[in-house]
């Protein structure tokens, strides 16, 4: 057996085409979708990611407003900028790049962004909407894991899904977003005893733990579907996921690569959140 790829790049292309069409329809109604991105500091990787988002936004017709603030920016000044963008009817989505410098409270910043403009899905109110299946904006990476499967024809209902990782950005929200598709879910984490015995039960295994090549082929049952939401830097350059891709691809039915899997969809799904946010803002 040799597993087929869950091709994130191809699916991202699909989603981008949908976004472009929705943006064109909004512009025809006189609405110009705009996303504001705030970066505090000049970390080269963060600047690069922000510029990549700008390029991606331009390609689908979304206006992009980049605020690059100095590293020593006061918390009060950042909160004032967020409030200004909250009040600006022309700015439909707000994204604050993390991590923030030590003098700024991440929690305060997360709570300051208007929930309907919170394209990252990190506001406490949006986290509550995940639990209640309400009209909120949800984090892109957990959504990516699900979209990757659904758009590849995976039937999630009735399957046993094992999530390895209980982090705030992927593991926890993924539980409740996945439950909407009716699998049985087991959550494993750093204190799980005999991890392999749980992972082996999974028809679907989703790794989101942040440890390179942690899930090996001996831990996964033949024919399983494996979604790798991890991204880890490799010595000498490049990235790898949380699963041993080369080993697992010989025993599973479907597997997502890193890079080229889950991460490929995230920017496109942030744009989907922007469009959903516009709909929520118009309904109020």
Image: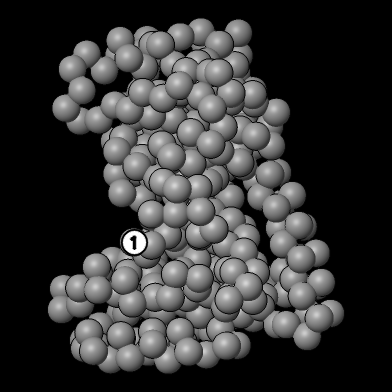
Q: How is the image coloured?
A: one colour
Q: Residue at the spot x=38%, y=29% of the render?
A: 163
**Secondary structure beneath label 1:** helix
Q: Is residue 15 left or right of residue 67?
A: right
Q: Nearer the viewer, residue 35 or 179?
A: 179
Question: Which x, y percent locates residue 78?
Answer: 30, 86
Q: Indicate the quadrant where residue 96 lies.
A: bottom left
Q: Quarter of the image for the C terminus: give it.
A: bottom right
- Disc tally is 1
Above/below status of 180 relative to 126: above
Q: Residue at the spot x=25%, y=69% of the render?
A: 106
Q: Nearer the viewer, residue 38 or 24?
A: 24
Question: Which x, y percent locates residue 200?
Answer: 38, 11
- The residue that label 1 is drawn on is 124
| Few, some or many residues within 10 Å of mark 1 (<14, 14–19, 20+) | few
Q: Residue at the spot x=54%, y=45% of the render?
A: 144
Question: Which x, y percent locates residue 281?
Answer: 58, 75
């Amino acid at each position: 057996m040799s597993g087929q790829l869950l091709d994130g790049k191809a699916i991202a292309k699909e989603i981008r085409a949908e976004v472009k069409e929705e943006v064109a329809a909004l512009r025809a109604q006189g609405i110009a979708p705009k996303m504001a991105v705030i970066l505090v500091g000049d970390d080269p990787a963060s600047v690069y990611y922000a510029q990549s988002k700008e390029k991606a936004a331009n390609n689908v017709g979304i206006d992009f407003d980049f605020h690059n603030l100095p590293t020593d920016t006061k918390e009060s000044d950042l909160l004032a900028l967020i409030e200004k963008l909250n009040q600006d009817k022309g700015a439909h989505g707000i994204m604050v790049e993390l991590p923030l410098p030590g003098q700024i409270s991440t929690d305060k910043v997360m709570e300051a962004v208007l929930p309907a403009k919170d394209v990252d899905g990190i506001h406490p109110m949006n986290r509550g909407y995940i639990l209640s299946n309400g009209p909120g904006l949800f984090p892109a990476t957990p959504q990516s894991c699900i979209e990757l499967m659904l758009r590849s024809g995976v039937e999630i209902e009735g399957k046993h899904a094992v999530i390895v990782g209980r982090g705030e950005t992927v593991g926890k929200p993924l539980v409740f977003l996945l439950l909407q598709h009716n699998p049985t879910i087991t959550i494993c984490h750093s204190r799980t005893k005999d991890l392999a015995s749980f992972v082996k039960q999974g028809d679907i295994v989703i790794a989101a733990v942040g440890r390179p090549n942690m899930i090996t082929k001996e831990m996964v049952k033949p024919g399983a579907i494996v979604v790798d939401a991890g991204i880890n830097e490799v010595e000498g350059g490049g990235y790898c996921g949380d699963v041993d891709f080369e080993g697992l691809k010989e025993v599973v039915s479907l597997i997502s690569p890193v890079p080229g899997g889950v991460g490929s969809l995230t920017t496109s799904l942030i744009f989907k959140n922007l469009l959903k946010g516009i709909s929520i803002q118009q309904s109020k």
